[in-house]
C-alpha cells in the first residue's frame, strides 16, 4: 500500500499556496512562498515552511499566518477530500539563508587559497 503522507503534504502545499495567493486580502501576503509541508505519521499535524520575498518581512508574515491559521485550515477543508484536515503550524523556512551562508564560507575558503 502506498504511503499517503507525501501525497497529502503535496496537496496541502498546493492548496495553502492558493489560499494565501487568492483568498487573503493583505497585499503583503501575496509575496509569501510555501516552500515545504511536512505531515506527521498520523496526519494530525502539518508543518508548513514559508518564506517571504522580502526577507525582513518574513517574521511579520509568519505571525500573521499563525494568527489566521484557523481561517486557512477551514478553507483548506473545503478544498481537500480527506476525512480530517490536519492542524496547521507555520514555520520560517531558513533553507535559503543556510545555502547563502554555506556559499559565503566556500567563497571565503576559495579566496584564501588564491
Image (cartoon, grey):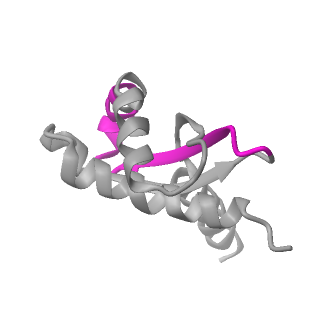
Using the image as rendered, state which of residue 84 and residue 7 is in the foreground.
Answer: 84
Instruction: Confirm whether the magenta stretch covers residue 87.
Output: no
Residue 37 rendering spot, x and y as whole percentages: 58, 53
Residue 98 rendering spot, x and y as whole percentages: 60, 53
Name which residue lies at 51% across and 55% down: 12
Q: How many marks?
A: 0
> Which contiguous range is marked in magenta?
42-64
Can the viewer see residue 53 in this picture?
A: no
Considering the image in quadrants, where does the C terminus appear? bottom right
Q: Is residue 63 left or right of residue 22?
A: right
- Please determine whether, in this image, residue 28 is positioned above or below residue 36: above
- Please determine whether, in this image, residue 90 is positioned above or below residue 51: above
What is the quadrant of residue 102 in the picture?
A: bottom right
Residue 46 rendering spot, x and y as whole percentages: 61, 43
Considering the image in quadrants, where does the N terminus appear? bottom right
Can the viewer see residue 11 in this picture?
A: yes
Instruction: Confirm whether the magenta stretch covers residue 54.
Output: yes
Residue 22 rendering spot, x and y as whole percentages: 20, 54
Amino acid at each position: 500500500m502506498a504511503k499517503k503522507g507525501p501525497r497529502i503534504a503535496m496537496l496541502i502545499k498546493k492548496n495553502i499556496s492558493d489560499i494565501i495567493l487568492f483568498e487573503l486580502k493583505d497585499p503583503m501576503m501575496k509575496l509569501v512562498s510555501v516552500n515545504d509541508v511536512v505531515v506527521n505519521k498520523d496526519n494530525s499535524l502539518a508543518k508548513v515552511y514559508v518564506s517571504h520575498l522580502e526577507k525582513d518581512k518574513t517574521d511579520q508574515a509568519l505571525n500573521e499566518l499563525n494568527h489566521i491559521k484557523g481561517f486557512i485550515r477551514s478553507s483548506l477543508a473545503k478544498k481537500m477530500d480527506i476525512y480530517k484536515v490536519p492542524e496547521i503550524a507555520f514555520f520560517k523556512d531558513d533553507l535559503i539563508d543556510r545555502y547563502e551562508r554555506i556559499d559565503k564560507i566556500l567563497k571565503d575558503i576559495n579566496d584564501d587559497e588564491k
